[in-house]
Image (spheres, rainbow, N blue to C red):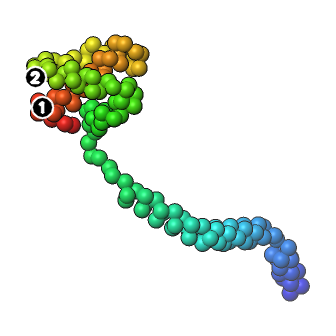
Amino acid sequence: MGQKMIIQQNKMTTFVSNDSGAVTVDWVVLTAGLVGLGLAVSAVVSGGVGDLSSDVGSQLSDQEISASFAADPLASWSPLQWDQHNAGIYDSYSDWMSNFTDDQLLAHYENTAQWSTYPPNSGHPYDTYHDEHFIARDEAISRGLISPV
């Protein structure tokens, strides 16, 4: 009985003094703390995120989205916008082109080769022929020769 008692006592001492499981307990406590901190942060931030989400949603719902793109980037320009960049050019070219026959007008409108090889805004001939093209387009639309994009 004495020997069995000593063996039991040694096993009990070894079990009590063994601290290998303490590391696991430390990690469990740290993980629980991090999860709790994450939940607390998400509770604080969730109200602001919800407000931001509804603000973005209302802003997007007010936007108009076009399902197609105009082939002509200046399709929505008005004569006033032309005059902002080159005063009097629109009326001057419109008066000149109003005397064109339909065939002359369409030929002028379709002749993009005369300005397409020059860099944008490089002056004459680019600006001149470019303006003539788009003003001829407007005249052709007003005559019903081409459809507005």
The mark total stands at 2
Dot 2: few (<14), some (14–19), or many (≥20) neighbours within 10 Å? some
Residue at 40% in and 28% down: 85
Q: Residue at x 46, y 65 (%)?
A: 54
Do we see residue 110 in this rendering?
no
Distance Cα–Cα, label 2 vs label 1? 8 Å
Q: Quadrant of the N terminus?
A: bottom right
Give whichever of 17, 14 is nearer the camera: 17
Mark 1 residue element: helix
Left or right of 30? Residue 54 is left
Residue bearing the label numbered 2: 102
Residue 117 position, x and y percent, is 33, 13
Dot 1 alpha-carbon crowd within 10 angstroms: few under 14, some 14 to 19, many 20 or more: few
Q: Earlier in the sequence, mark 2 or mark 1?
A: 2
Q: Quadrant of the C terminus?
A: top left
Coordinates of residue 29 in the picture (x, y in percent): 72, 71
Residue type, label 2: Asp
Using the image, determine if residue 39 lies above or below residue 63.
Answer: below
The circle on residue 42 is: none
**Figure check: 52 above or below 85:** below
Q: Nearer the viewer, residue 19 or 124?
A: 124
Identify the secondary structure beneath mark 2: helix
Asked if residue 25 is positioned above or below residue 59 in the image, the reply reads below
Question: Mark 2 near mark 1, Cβ–Cβ under 8 Å?
Answer: yes
Tell me the amino acid under the disc marked 1: Arg
Left or right: where does residue 78 sit relative to residue 55? Answer: left
Residue 11, image x and y in percent? 82, 76
Q: Position of residue 45 (x, y in %)?
A: 60, 67
Q: Where residue 143 is drawn, which disc sits there?
A: 1
Of 90 and 47, the residue lying toward us: 90
Q: Quadrant of residue 87?
A: top left
